Amino acid sequence: VKQLNDLQNIGFKLTDGLIGDTLVLFEHRLKDIGEVLIDAFAFVRGLNSSIILSICLRELLDPDKNLKRHDVLDYILDRIDNPEETAYRTLRSYNIGNPVNFHPRKNGSISSILKYAPIVYEFMLVKFGADSRIATYLMNEITAARIVKAKLHESNRSLVLSSASIETLWQELNTLFNAYYKAGVHFAPQLLFLFKTCLEEAVIACLFEGYLAKLFRYRVGFQSSRVDEIPPLQVTPLSHRKRKTIHEARMEWWHAI
């Protein structure tokens, strides 16, 4: 702390971005020095630890950070009051999960792929659960990206095979979509306009023959496509308030359809 204060006296600024970068730099040692870092950040910035933790989460969830591990997210979320609400607000501040971003008239390129590395989506599903607002919100982005992928593939079938990196992106997206679907994450009704533009039967079937059939208690023999399983994460799930009842979800879709 003294060294940080000395640096500040000669013009050094402990910015939000630097706080996030420091956490990522020391992510392997957070169990040992995490509390010391948080206390030091709070002291130097003259803020309480709750505000510092919120800053940490906001910086870690900045898509530009390109986070590759879940450990640092897990550490911060376990120490935040009301972590689901805080994480949800943070994701919304970055406009993650907004299906309007993937409107087919506006998008149609490789840049429309997910904003985070797959590990972030995998972690959020395990940490908050399939019934959480976090999972539903991220499902918006995953589904929208999956539909854009189907449209790109239909318009340019050579695109998928054009490079190994693109093939990897497609496979990661397929895996995430199926993982969220199989976990029982809700499809939001506002995605319906995107499904109407989808040209891939397997994706459409996940909604109509899978999710909606189950939601409205129709018996349909449907199985989603098989993809690689996501390796289990060593994460302690957070308790959360169930987002909505089956009846509420059913009524939302009834009005949308």
Image: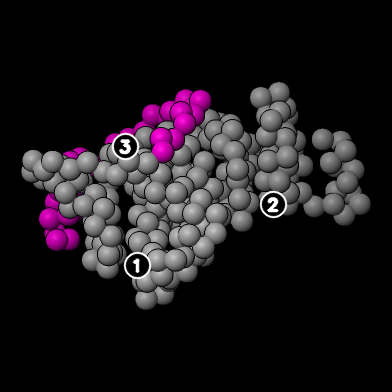
Query: 82 and 202: which one is in front?
Result: 202
In the image, residue 55 lies at what x, y percent? 61, 46
Q: Which mark is residue 154?
A: 1
Direction left: furthest residue:
218
Q: Residues within 10 Å of mark 2 (few under 14, many from 20)?
A: some
Residue 31 in the figure: left or right of residue 126: right
Residue 103 visible to an observer of this rendering: no
* Real-space CA distance between mark 2 and mark 3, rounded to the nearest whole angstrom: 34 Å
Residue at numbered disc 2: 17
Q: Earlier in the sequence, mark 3 or mark 1?
A: 1
What amino acid is at disc 2? Gly
Residue 198 in the figure: left or right of residue 67: left
Span shown in magenta: 228-257
In the image, residue 168 lies at what x, y percent? 51, 50
Q: Which mark is residue 194?
A: none
Residue 251 in the figure: left or right of residue 226: left
In the image, residue 182 lies at what x, y percent? 30, 39
Residue at numbered disc 3: 183
Does dot 1 land on a helix, a strand or a loop?
Answer: helix
**Residue plotted at (39% across, 53% down):** 142
* Real-space CA distance between mark 3 and mark 1, rounded to the nearest whole angstrom: 28 Å
What amino acid is at disc 3? Ala
Residue 250 visible to an observer of this rendering: yes
Residue 132 in the figure: left or right of residue 213: right
